[in-house]
């Protein structure tokens, strides 16, 4: 399951969706809004996406993972809109028979979301200022 | 670009570019069936001074696929300007 959502991401619900009686491992990466950047305190982050393209790229990443690792289930969800400190912005979850492939597939999933998905974030500081995060050129 | 303008290309914009240009779509008049992304970039930099600043870098997606600047597009294509990304 892959998606872009404006809703709160429920990690426990996703764990239940990933569980499978033939899987001995579930690995998650969970991205969370941090309360600071390198310069000042952060109150929240506004996320924006080219949603249709992100969905296409997530499908490709899912296909690459299924082709390269023997996994049972894959879930990748990125949230958009305004998120407060402590809220989950992105989650990647993988279930597999053994832990090694779940760790590797999960790591590949989040690395590629960050490199390839057209998503942007703007940090809103405690001071009231806000700033778009500089980012990297898309590598798709 | 010739003076006869009979078609409009719509370019989706996001993030800092959308905010600076105060619009989520940029319109480009063209008079041929197709135009290269290189020509679009040149036009945008001429008409939107913000995009000609050295610190602003961007590429284009055509129908949700990143294309290089010699790729040609028509008004039926979905074109998006992609500045540096920062998801996660």
Image (cartoon, rainbow, N blue to C red):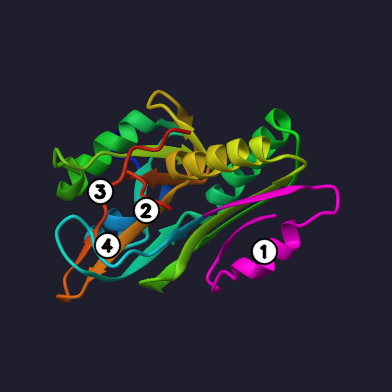
Q: Secondary structure at mark 4?
A: helix
Residue drawn 33% across the image and 29% down it: B38
Q: Please tell me how crowded label 1 is: few (under 14), some (14-19), or many (20+) other residues with Cα within 10 Å.
A: some
Q: Chain of mark 4?
A: B
Q: Mark 1 or mark 3, which is nearer the start of the sequence?
A: 1
What numbered label is drawn on residue B13?
Answer: 2
Q: Residues within 10 Å of mark 3 (few under 14, many from 20)?
A: some
Q: Residue at x 31, y 39 (%)?
A: B58
Q: Nearer the viewer, residue B62 or B84?
A: B84
Q: Disc 3, disc 2: CB below 8 Å? A: no
The reply to whether label 3 and label 2 mark residues of one chain is: no
Q: Nearer the viewer, residue A14 or B24?
A: A14
Asked if residue A8 is among those painted magenta in the image, a careful observer would answer yes
Q: Which residue is mark 1?
A: A14
How far apart are the two marked residues, 3 and 1, measured between alpha carbons?
Answer: 31 Å
- Between the residue at mark 3 and the residue at mark 4, the CA separation in whole angstroms equals 14 Å
């Amino acid at each position: 399951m892959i998606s872009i959502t404006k809703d709160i991401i429920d990690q426990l619900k996703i764990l239940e969706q990933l569980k499978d009686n033939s899987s001995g491992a579930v690995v998650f990466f969970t991205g969370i809004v941090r309360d600071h950047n390198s310069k000042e305190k952060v109150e929240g982050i506004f996320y924006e996406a080219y949603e249709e393209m992100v969905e296409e790229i997530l499908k490709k990443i899912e296909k690459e993972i299924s082709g390269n690792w023997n996994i049972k289930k894959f879930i990748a969800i990125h949230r958009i809109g305004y998120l407060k400190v402590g809220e989950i912005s992105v989650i990647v979850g993988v279930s597999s028979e053994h832990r090694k492939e779940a760790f590797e597939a999960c790591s590949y999933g989040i690395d590629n979301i960050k490199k390839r998905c057209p998503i942007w974030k703007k940090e809103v500081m405690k001071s009231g200022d806000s700033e778009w995060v500089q980012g990297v050129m898309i590598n798709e | 670009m010739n003076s006869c303008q009979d078609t409009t290309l719509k370019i989706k914009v996001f993030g800092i570019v959308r905010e600076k240009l105060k619009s989520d779509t940029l319109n480009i008049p063209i008079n041929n069936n197709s135009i290269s992304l290189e020509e679009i970039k040149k036009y945008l930099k001429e008409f939107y001074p913000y995009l000609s600043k050295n610190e602003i870098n961007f590429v284009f997606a055509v129908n949700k696929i990143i294309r290089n600047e010699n790729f040609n597009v028509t008004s039926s294509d979905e074109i998006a300007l992609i500045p540096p990304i920062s998801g996660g």
